[in-house]
Image (cartoon, rainbow, N blue to C red):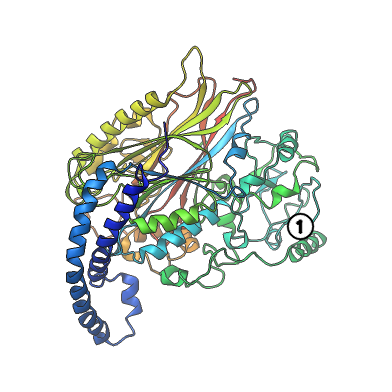
């Protein structure tokens, strides 16, 4: 299957489309600004609280006639552009595939060589988020604004969170998991010219993404590093980019004064943190960047909480001093182990957490509501600092491909560190109300994640979707889930080049994610909860229809509280969501006839932990029979606090291959 790198098959149509959109854009921009001036966000209301009451009204009185006059003047040009734009959409392709052109930062080919088919397997990390990048006037109805600046900042946060250092702490003594405050006082960093393998018996500084600006940490994993790690006897061979900090059981996890001084000296020798890749001119346009020093979730913070950044693991045995290459110390991510930090659910087989950062070494990212095309370009530019392959501007326009007229695309965007082999998009034809104006649908992708010694391709399937949003449209969503299942099966069949007798490809995983716009606790969503999709795909957060696991929380934030000081930073939002009372104040809860729609400050007993409408599902059906797929970690992420009204989610899967070659 050919991947489309441009929206039209030839340059003539592209130029004609650009010309038609150039005629439409002034009218579109003026209308957006005019409507947006009458829909203030709570942040803007607070900013104007100190101004005279007549000041804002005076601004509206002055600017509205100007906008109206310019809007009327631009209408004839917009009409001509619209007449040219509509028929061109019949030739438009359903998506644009972008690959990073800078070879110095490209690492997709390197990642393909990291699969160890004869080893214990490999882990893959998936993320999904609804980022609410609508035209500014529409975004304001969700209490967010300045779409262009938000798009740039969302991209910055995601790629900085994914490329931050990863440090795993192994404690030799299973009975003592304490880590002293001294162990967080200094940064472990490799010294210049020090290429020897070593294990660090020291602590780590409270580290944020601001202090590490690696853009492609995976590209630095040399073959020598992998060979060294392969023979080290570490617990997880599939985790390549890992710095291990060993805390001996004899001293109860505390560093001596000598060790502390040594590590502090190393931190000072490493020099100051690398400056930001971009200026901060646009950052001040979004409200949640006016942070105090020490707000650990912020990009501009120089400290991070232990809860946000560190995951402790209990080691099964000692590790030889020559097992860890110092190059890996600076290249991997800090993770958190909830079994040590907060182990409330001991029967769970995998880690789960509320994290202030996107997972380190994030492999795949699926975004929804990237509707604004200019915002999509800004977001793509930021994500390309980390992801080599991106599929964006997904969907159809005008009357092409769907029953009703479509003004905006599907809002889906996919980013990957691994090469994309095939892609397909389908539009839901049964959208209703405002949703019918967008070409909501499903994006299906096939990626190559490695190869076996026998030159068999190892592939994975990822699907991203966004269902009908209007409350009460249960029948519409169920029909869309039916179509989604059919399209999934059709895509697998059309892109498979294997047979049972002669498998040319081995399927490692099949993941489905997106904003499904129903939760697993609301009585009004019973039909969706019992859909057959959940018999084929597993939901790590779900016990059964109508019941979530106790640790699962809602992903839909109460828009009215987005800019409250208690939740306007990633670290603050994380702390609030870790408490039951905090969740009641800032999450939207399942609807009930006995409760009002207002969530703020309610103390009554509520069902579940909020409306979880963003899903991350996986299946074991259709995978290579000798391999096993398990969830290693599931995260609810607060790093986009103040930028969207949804919580991103992430899931790390481990594909276990066993010891024999397939």
Name the side, left or right, on which 369 lies relative to 162: left
Q: Residue furthest front?
A: 12
In this rendering, is residue 31 above or below 481?
A: below
The x, y position of residue 412, in whole percent, is: 36, 46
Of residue 599 and residue 478, the one placed in the foreground of this image is 478
User: Helix, strand, or loop for circle 1?
Assistant: loop
| Residue for point 18% across, 59% down | 79
Q: Residue at x 72, y 66 (%)?
A: 271
Relative height, residue 628 to residue 131 (above, below): above
Q: Is residue 92 left or right of residue 416?
A: left
Measured as percent of width and height from the top left, residue 285 is found at 41, 71
**Does residue 64 appear left or right of residue 156 in this picture?**
left
Looking at this view, is 425 or 78 the one in front?
Answer: 78
Work out whether residue 481 can be spotted.
yes
Residue at the (23%, 65%) spot, across then down: 27
The correct choice, above or below, for 359 with respect to 271 in the image is above
Residue occupied by mark 1: 255
In percent of width and height, residue 183 lies at: 70, 58
The image quadrant where one finds the N terminus is top left
In depth, the one of 251 and 74 nearer the eye is: 74
Sort mark 1 into few (<14), some (14-19) or many (20+) by Cα contacts within 10 Å: many
> Which picture quadrant has residue 541?
top left
Residue 434 sits above or below residue 536 on the image: below
Q: Quadrant of the C terminus?
A: top right
Q: Nearer the viewer, residue 377 or 123?
A: 377
The answer to whether residue 565 of the structure is visible from this angle is no
- Left or right: where does residue 235 sit relative to residue 355? right
């Amino acid at each position: 299957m050919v991947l489309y790198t441009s929206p039209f098959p030839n340059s003539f149509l592209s130029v004609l489309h650009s010309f038609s959109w150039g005629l439409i854009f002034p009218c579109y921009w003026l209308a957006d600004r005019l409507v947006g001036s009458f829909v203030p966000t709570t942040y803007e209301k607070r900013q104007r609280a100190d101004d005279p009451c007549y000041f804002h009204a005076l601004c509206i009185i002055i600017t509205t006639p100007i906008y109206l006059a310019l809007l009327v003047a631009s209408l004839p040009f917009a009409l001509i552009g619209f007449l040219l734009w509509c028929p061109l959409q019949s030739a438009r392709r359903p998506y644009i595939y972008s690959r990073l052109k800078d070879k110095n930062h490209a690492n997709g080919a390197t990642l393909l060589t990291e699969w160890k088919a004869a080893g214990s397997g490999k882990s893959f990390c998936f993320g999904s988020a609804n980022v609410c990048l609508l035209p500014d006037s529409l975004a304001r109805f969700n209490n967010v604004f300045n779409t262009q600046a938000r798009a740039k900042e969302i991209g910055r946060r995601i790629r900085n969170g994914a490329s931050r250092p990863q440090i795993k702490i192994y404690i030799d003594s299973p009975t003592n998991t304490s880590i002293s405050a001294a162990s967080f006082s200094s940064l472990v960093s490799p010294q210049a010219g020090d290429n020897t393998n070593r294990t660090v018996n020291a602590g780590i500084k409270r580290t944020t993404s601001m202090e590490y600006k690696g853009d492609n940490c995976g590209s630095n994993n040399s073959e020598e590093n992998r060979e060294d790690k392969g023979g080290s006897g570490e617990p997880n061979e599939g985790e390549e980019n890992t710095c291990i900090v060993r805390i001996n059981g004899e001293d109860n996890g505390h560093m001596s004064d000598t060790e502390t001084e040594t590590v502090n000296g190393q931190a000072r020798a490493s020099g100051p943190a690398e400056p930001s890749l971009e200026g901060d001119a646009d950052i001040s346009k979004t409200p949640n960047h006016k942070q105090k020093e020490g707000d650990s979730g912020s990009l501009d913070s120089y400290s991070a909480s232990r809860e946000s950044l560190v995951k402790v693991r209990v080691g099964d045995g000692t590790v030889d001093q020559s097992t860890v290459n110092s190059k890996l110390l600076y290249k991997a991510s800090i993770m958190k182990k909830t079994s040590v930090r907060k182990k409330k659910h001991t029967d769970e087989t995998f880690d789960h957490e509320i994290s202030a950062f996107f997972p380190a070494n994030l492999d795949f990212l699926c975004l929804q509501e990237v509707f604004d095309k200019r915002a999509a370009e800004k977001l793509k530019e930021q994500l390309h600092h980390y992801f080599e392959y991106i599929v964006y501007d997904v969907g159809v326009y005008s009357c092409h491909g769907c029953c009703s007229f479509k003004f905006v695309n599907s809002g889906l965007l996919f980013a990957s560190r691994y090469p994309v082999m095939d892609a397909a998009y389908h539009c839901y034809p049964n959208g209703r109300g405002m949703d019918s104006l967008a070409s909501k649908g499903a994006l299906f992708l096939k990626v190559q994640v490695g190869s076996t010694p026998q030159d068999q391709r190892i592939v994975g399937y990822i699907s991203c979707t966004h269902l009908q949003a209007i409350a009460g449209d249960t029948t519409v969503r169920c029909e869309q889930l039916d179509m989604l299942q059919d399209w999934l099966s059709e895509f697998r069949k059309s892109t498979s080049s294997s047979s049972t007798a002669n498998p040319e490809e081995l399927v490692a995983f099949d993941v489905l994610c997106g904003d499904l716009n129903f939760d697993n606790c609301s009585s009004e969503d019973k039909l969706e909860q019992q859909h057959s999709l959940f018999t084929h795909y597993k939901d790590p957060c779900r016990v059964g229809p109508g019941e979530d696991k106790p640790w699962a929380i809602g992903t839909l934030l109460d828009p009215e509280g987005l800019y409250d000081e208690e939740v306007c930073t990633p670290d603050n939002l994380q702390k609030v969501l870790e408490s039951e009372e905090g969740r009641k104040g800032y999450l939207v809860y399942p609807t009930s006839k006995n409760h009002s729609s207002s969530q703020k400050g309610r103390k009554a007993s509520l069902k579940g932990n909020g409306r979880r409408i963003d899903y991350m599902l996986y299946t074991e059906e259709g995978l290579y029979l000798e391999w096993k797929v398990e969830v290693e970690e599931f995260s609810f992420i607060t790093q986009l606090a103040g930028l969207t009204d949804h919580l991103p989610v992430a899931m790390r899967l481990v594909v276990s291959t066993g010891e024999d070659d397939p």
